[in-house]
Amino acid sequence: MYKILIADDHPLFREAIHNVISDGFPESEVMETADLDSALALTQEHDDLDLILLDLNMPGMHGLNGLINLRNEAPTVPVVIVSAEQDKQVVLQAITYGAVGFITKSSPRAQMTDAIEQILNGNVYLPSDIIRTQKASPRRHHEEAGIPPELLQALTRKQLLVLERMTKGESNKQIAYNLDIAETTVKAHVSAILRKLNVHNRVQAILSASDIDFTAYLRR
């Protein structure tokens, strides 16, 4: 049983998300609010929240400033952005500012359920179709990603495969299934990847590697 807050100013969408949670996570307690001030007040009243689903454009948000305010007030409660926004930079900025996931409002119901499940299990969820979108200008895979090529060369083939799956928003369990290895092995690879790339957590690794052309490195 989870305790979840839906913060969105569109009643129909709140109802739709409420239904997704009710069907996918029965017996969960769901609260709703339509503006940032109410969301902040509810986080103070309920310090046992498991998740906040936050709309980027509801009253009081002022874009990502609302996310920053919420993270400052309730740093221990995971926040996932639920938005119609499809811009890759906004998605990446939201994660940088402390969101643990980004769900687009156009996502199919099953995808939303899977995203919420991943986040409740402690993973980061990113919309892979947006993250893999290339920028209009010509790119140089290692320079734009900010990872020196020698650090990528230090990764083993299996670690590169795990990192590629991470950038697609897959959980350790999904990676283990897709690569046919044990979940404990995936965790060991993730730890090695973070160490070799000089990053502190999974989110930083995903952000820094989101534009890498993995085929170029896996071809070696």
Image (cartoon, grey):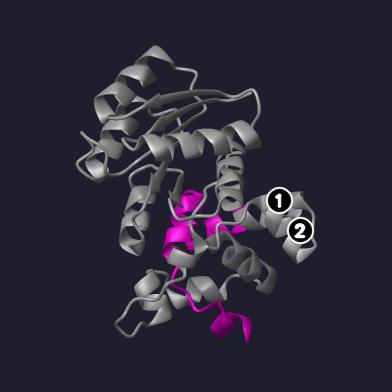
Left or right of 129: which side holds 71?
left
Left or right of 191: which side holds 94?
left
Residue drawn at 64 percent across, 69 percent down: 161
Any part of residue 46 in sight: yes
Tell me the element at label 2: helix
Q: In which quarter of the image is the N terminus?
A: top right
Q: Which of 3 and 161 is in front in this view?
A: 3
Mark 2 and mark 1 in contact? Answer it, CB < 8 Å. yes
**Which residue ends up furthest to the front in the rendered image?**
12
Question: In the rendered structure, does residue 37 fall within the stretch colored magenta?
Answer: no
Residue drawn at 43 percent across, 51 percent down: 105
The amino acid at mark 2 is: Tyr
Residue interval drawn in magenta: 191-220
Q: Is residue 72 placed above or below 17 in the rendered structure?
A: above
Q: Where is residue 80 in the image (x, y as percent from the top left)?
A: 44, 41
Residue 173 numbered mark, or none: 1
Q: Position of residue 17 (x, y in %)?
A: 49, 38
The amino acid at mark 1 is: Lys
Q: Badge 1 local density, few (<14 within 10 Å), some, or many (20+)?
A: some
Tell me the element at label 1: helix
Question: In the rendered structure, does residue 197 fall within the stretch colored magenta?
Answer: yes
Figure quadrant of residue 116: top right
Per the image, the residue denoted by label 2 is 177
Tell me the distance, in whole angstroms, between the alpha carbons under discs 2 and 1: 6 Å
Q: Badge 2 local density, few (<14 within 10 Å), some, or many (20+)?
A: few
